[in-house]
Amino acid sequence: MSKASQKAYDEIRRRILSGEFPEGSHLKEEELADICGVSRTPIRDALRKLAADYYVRSVPNHGTFVSHWSGEEISDIFVLRAMLEGYAARLAARRAKNQELAEMQSACEQIDALLGKPNTFDKESFFAANKRYHTALRAAAGSDRLASTLTRLVEQPVVMRTVISYTMEDFIRSNAHHWEILEALREGDGAWAEAAMRGHIHAAYHVYRRAYGLSDHSEQAAKDILTL
Amino acid sequence: MSKASQKAYDEIRRRILSGEFPEGSHLKEEELADICGVSRTPIRDALRKLAADYYVRSVPNHGTFVSHWSGEEISDIFVLRAMLEGYAARLAARRAKNQELAEMQSACEQIDALLGKPNTFDKESFFAANKRYHTALRAAAGSDRLASTLTRLVEQPVVMRTVISYTMEDFIRSNAHHWEILEALREGDGAWAEAAMRGHIHAAYHVYRRAYGLSDHSEQAAKDILTL
DNA sequence: ATGGTATTTATTGTATACATTTAGGGCATC
DNA sequence: GATGCCCTAAATGTATACAATAAATACCAT
């Protein structure tokens, strides 16, 4: 995407994530054009890409609306993420290069540093370092298709909301998982890496579930992951 | 997508699948506009959607190019498909409704009918019925996110090429799998459904591999699936 | 002759004007 | 008073003109 389209994409996405554009709200192209300071053409480009990434849904001749995430869909996302990110970890155990491992270690150390100063700890920084870690792992798995599928699953409001409801203990455990997965990769133990990664995603799912209280159906869906 | 955009999408996609637009070729917006009889605006919409569905890749300020599928990427696709479609089968074993099961049975019967007349058998009809079967199964799994992720993985040149290189025995075995999976769903046996579906995808992968001769790396990636 | 630079040209990116579609409201009719 | 139709307004869909970008080419200087 080029300049104006990218600018519009970033701006609209930001407002969706911040809640300024709430779930279900109708995004009108002309309004967005005013807000973003560009014409409707790049706005339409941005909306198409946001739809491809599941942030919004477009209905022909009616417009585009901010996606609503039902409890079931959120469970689905975590289940798929556990499966795919676990697989990525297994692949990375065999394929990871030193540079990628170093990047992951750097992210872990950065998070440790953040956790070492609880007074100034902020979730945004954790979020950024966490993203850096997982991005490096996906790159290490060496499958573009897997990486892009995962990015579309993960780059969602739900992940950000999960992090927001983390307690300090959750952050500490999360980075313990990061270190453990990294060690598994260095040992070349794909099964260990996969298992640890699945645990990592499970833990995140249950934090989310506690914070937002999902439905019965979701509970059932959540158990599917346990039988994998 | 609305009329003109959809028309352009279908037409361009058809030409990619038929080989008229070969891998790596540069799709110029004005040419496409002439071919499709619409202006550049819906062409651009169509190209964005084709990029989201991995048919083409867009490079800013340079244009869009028909995707090239390396052996590694094709292996990746089959591995991911086995994982996700297997999971869909497991979910469907618990969630499938009678209507969806009937649709799947109808597709199986149609394929049986095709196979019963080997003289007039054509792969296009099989392809259509096969698609109908898998679409119904994904619907039965009851996860929109899973279904759309799978569709993006599967609706690709690689699947069509696989079918093209099927022998008569391959078609017969393929539909035997379909019947078996359907029975597993009716029994509510998720583990059976998943295992049978994985076998189904494995078989397709090896047909492809024999026909197109994938690289060593791909062989390695292919084995990953066995350790799941 | 070769290297770098300006110019040209082909292509994509952006803006805007116009067409089409659809929802909502008002009016007439039953 | 309810119902059906038409008309209007607001939004999206489409076409086209213009701008910006990048590659290719020609030209000049060394």
Image (cartoon, coloured by chain):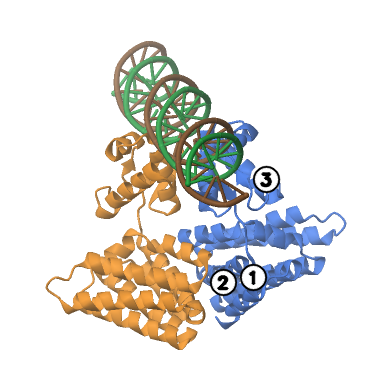
Chain colours: A blue, B orange, C green, D brown
Q: Amino acid at mark 1?
A: Ile
Q: Amino acid at mark 3?
A: Arg
Crowd band around label 3 with a 10 angstrom C-alpha radius: few (<14), some (14–19), many (20+): few
- Residue A86, label in figure: 2
Spatial CA span between label 2 and label 1 = 9 Å
Crowd band around label 2 with a 10 angstrom C-alpha radius: few (<14), some (14–19), many (20+): many
Instruction: Using the rendered image of the protein, determine whether residue A1 is visible from the camera's viewpoint.
Output: no
- The spot of residue A99 in percent (x, y) is 57, 58
Identify residue for label 3: A15
Q: Is disc 2 in contact with disc 1, using a CB cutoff of under 8 Å? A: yes
Q: Amino acid at mark 2?
A: Gly
- The spot of residue B223 in percent (x, y) is 41, 76
Q: Secondary structure at mark 3?
A: helix
Give the chain of mark 3: A
- The spot of residue A204 in percent (x, y) is 69, 69
Q: Secondary structure at mark 2?
A: helix
Crowd band around label 1 with a 10 angstrom C-alpha radius: few (<14), some (14–19), many (20+): many
